[in-house]
Image: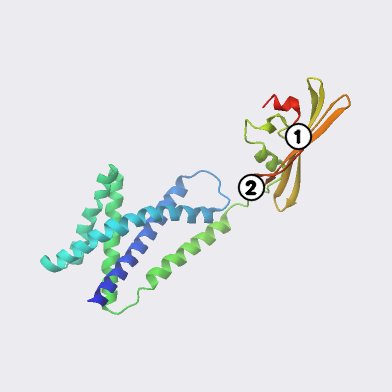
Amino acid sequence: MENSFKSLLLRKLTVTFVTTTILSVFFVIVYFSNDLGVSYNQGNDFIGWFVVYAMFIGLIILIYGNTVSITIEYLQRKWFQQYGWLYVLILGLFGLANGVLFQDVMAALFGMVAAIIYGILDKWLYKRALMGKSIKPFFVIPLASLILCWGCLELISPPRPPFTKEDAVDNATSSKGTIIDKFPEDIGKWEGTIGEYQVIRETSAEEVGKEIYIVTFTEIWKKGNEKGTWTLSYKVDRQSSTLYSKQGDIPFYNMTQY
């Protein structure tokens, strides 16, 4: 009895895994075919979207699909003939319930197809178990296929353009409503007067690592014998822009502006 239960549990989990993988890959392919944007890491995008779909689809199959499947198997053994086609048919009809849940005809059709795929795989695994055959290929082949798809997509992805100083400055100055709004949005200087002050504002960038930059905003002011400097620096890469250092005091005329 215990071995029978373990065998049933392993079979259902295996079918859940394989069905989820098949459907998730299908939806990712549909998504990619409709996505007109340029992706520089298509393999990573593929895996990322696969995980999103797999979590959603897998949860439905794990809870609803397995509950219905086990119930149908039990009822067939007790009251009906154990025809494989009948099991798959009944399971497919229950798959239509997705249409009720999401109030969508396409969801019902996809649910039915998913249930039929589940049912066919389930019966296939059941027959293999009776013949004493291993179910390892049902884990190895999907995983190997995912790795192969990831590798191929990464190879054919267009090369990512270099992340330059100019790009770093664009990232650092992309936010609005901050104290650096008055600085040049490109590498360079601005000179002018603010009230009685002679002011120089400079935006500069220095590479400190591979595609990692320190973007510095420097302000120099002078009024008669009064003068001063303050700087604000950010460490910038492709994904982020974080405060790196701050030196000096913001001049009075700036404090009245912000």
Q: Nearer the viewer, residue 49 or 120?
A: 49
Mark 1, secondary structure of its residue: loop
Quarter residue 200 falls in: top right
Q: Nearer the viewer, residue 109 or 57?
A: 57
Q: Amino acid at mark 1?
A: Asp
Could you say where residue 31 lies in the image, as x and y percent from the top left?
A: 44, 48
Horizontal side of 77 relative to 110 (left or right) equals left
Could you say where residue 177 lies in the image, as x and y percent from the top left?
A: 62, 30
Q: Is residue 81 visible?
A: no
The label number, if any, that marks residue 238 in the structure image: 2
The answer to whether residue 36 is above or below residue 132 is above
Mark 2, secondary structure of its residue: loop
Say which residue appears at 73% left-offset and 45% top-offset: 214
Mark 2 vs mark 1, CA separation in Å: 30 Å
Say which residue appears at 84% left-offset and 30% top-offset: 227
Q: Amino acid at mark 2?
A: Arg
Q: Mark 1 — residue?
A: 249
Quarter containing the C terminus? top right
Q: In the displayed orientation, state which residue is furthest to the bottom.
A: 132
Could you say where residue 146 lies in the image, as x and y percent from the top left?
A: 46, 62
